[in-house]
Image (cartoon, rainbow, N blue to C red):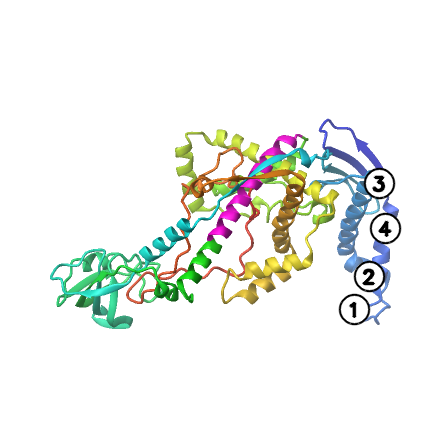
Amino acid sequence: MQVEEIKIETPLTRQFTITVPADDIEGKVSERLAELGKTVKMPGFRPGHVPANILRKQYGPRIMGEVLERALSDSSAEVMKEKDLRPAMQPQVKIENFDEGKDLVYSITIEIMPDIEPVDFAKIKLENPVVALEDSMVDEALERIAAEQKVFEKTDEDRASVTEDALLVDFTGRVDGVEFPGGAAKDFQLELDSQNFIPGFIEQVVGAKPGENRKIKVTFPTDYGAEDMAGKDAEFEIDVKELRVRKGIEINDELAKAAGLESLDAMKDAIRERMGSEYGSISRNRLKRSLLDQLADLANFEIPARMADHEFAQIWQNISGEPLESPEQDHEGHDHGDHEGHDHGDQGAADQKVDPAAQARFQEFLKESGKTVDELKEEYRGIAARRVRLGLLLTETGRENNITVADEELNRAVVTEAQRFPGQEQQVVEFYQKDPAAREQLRAPLFEDKVIDFVLELASVSDKSVTADELMAEPGESAGEDEGKPKAKAKKKAAPKKAAPKKAAPKKAAPKKADAKKKAPAKKKEAKK
């Protein structure tokens, strides 16, 4: 094998012309044909006695393709090993010349990993925002929970119903004059502020009084869950039996028992634990963001251009709904001895479909931003470069310090993911068992968090007392955890609350359960860099 390096100006790109002798290729072809000849069965010949010329005629083209593919793989791997090159992404190979019986000549372009200088993490100073949970905060959460409970009691008031009320009703639904399954109920409590019913249903009931009979006409949505009802006109006859008003809920043991807890004290403990966990998670994300900001300032090395292009294509697909052509993302066959935790996504943009909903959101985002598409692309190219640079720095830190994700940790992550799909846990587990790429996408955020923990142990971190409002406030835009997607307005988190009971009257179709075999998002789930 002959190797000639081609000098080019790009600092992280190496290019070679490689020649594999024809004799080497022919030797491999003959060897494979001989192996095949021992087992192949052909009419008129005993197994193992098929003439070589017939074997070559029948199987030669296929064997030649296999041998060429192996020759390209083996020779390029040998060059990278001899030259001590660590490819950042899958090398680009171009066959320059080959005919049967002649040398194989091809060029290979390799984008390599940059040299990353070690960072003295001990010099990094960070403040960890901490909220001190007070009894008054737990009491406020209890008051919110109580206020959100919907308990109604009968009233003898002689008045029309309003949105805040409920009615006890009997109802019967008909399509073309015929009752349909599930369209009738007796002694049903109809809450007049509900959003779960067929459009136009509640609006025609508000104002009704006990003793009143109403006939209501509605049209089932075209996407209604029961296909035989979708798009059809229906009439509901409703007899109003009682007017009910909302009852104030006392904060006591009964409230706790309604939430499945033994006592009010137990409920307070549960709320305190939940709030502590939520605030702790937010504090961790804020601390991580601050760390990444400082690391971004320290990470001033050159990055592979194709890696940045691929990251940008992923971001642009995410925010605009339109796929961009992107370089192949594989690198070193995903040998995570070198690159563990640096996720380049799920698939090339060429395989992605246009997302009309995302496109509509993007157009609204574009209008609000006051920027042109080209200006936004330039902005997100900078974000892509930052992400790649931080990813490489964290990956190198993990590699140098032998940080890995054990199979047990990954298995726990699979179980956690499966729990997001109640009733389909086994399907999800089997999906991850069969799809190594999906498992790697779960491994990446685990690896990054372990590296972050390692760095935080070395950095100087001091706690800073903040209020809950200060912690929950939307942070600055310098290094958002949600870079790469249009931002929605921030909302304050409410205290933990009990889920409202499901209704059973004429209502919208429930959303279908998420597909258990849905792949992890192309982008990592951890806080974006």
- In the image, what residue type sits under mark 4? Glu
Please give the label number shown on residue 82. 3
Q: Quadrant of residue 498?
A: bottom left
Residue at horizontal 75 percent and vertical 52 percent from the top: 65
Q: Quadrant of the C terminus?
A: top right
Disc 3 on helix, strand or loop?
helix
Residue 36 at x, y percent in the picture: 82, 63
Task: Report the residue that reaches farthest toward the top.
Answer: 9
Residue at horizontal 72 percent and vertical 41 percent from the top: 91
In the image, 430: left or right of 256? right
Of badges 2 and 3, the one in the foreground is: 3
Please give the label number shown on residue 42. 1
Q: Quadrant of residue 305?
A: top right
Disc 2 on helix, strand or loop?
helix
Please give the label number shown on residue 26. 4
- Disc 1 and disc 2: Cα gap in Å? 10 Å
Stretch of the chain drawn in magenta: 275-300
Mark nearer the N terminus (1 vs 4):
4
Of badges 3 and 4, the one in the foreground is: 3
Q: Majority secondary structure of the magenta segment?
A: helix
Please give the label number shown on residue 386. none
Of badges 1 and 4, the one in the foreground is: 4
Please give the label number shown on residue 54. 2
Mark nearer the N terminus (3 vs 1):
1
Mark nearer the N terminus (2 vs 3):
2
The answer to the question of whether label 1 and label 2 lie on touching residues, with beta carbons closer than 8 A, is: yes
Mark nearer the N terminus (1 vs 2):
1
Residue 19 at x, y percent in the picture: 83, 40
In the image, 122: left or right of 326? right
> Looking at the image, is 364 positioned above or below residue 56?
above
- In the image, what residue type sits under mark 1? Met
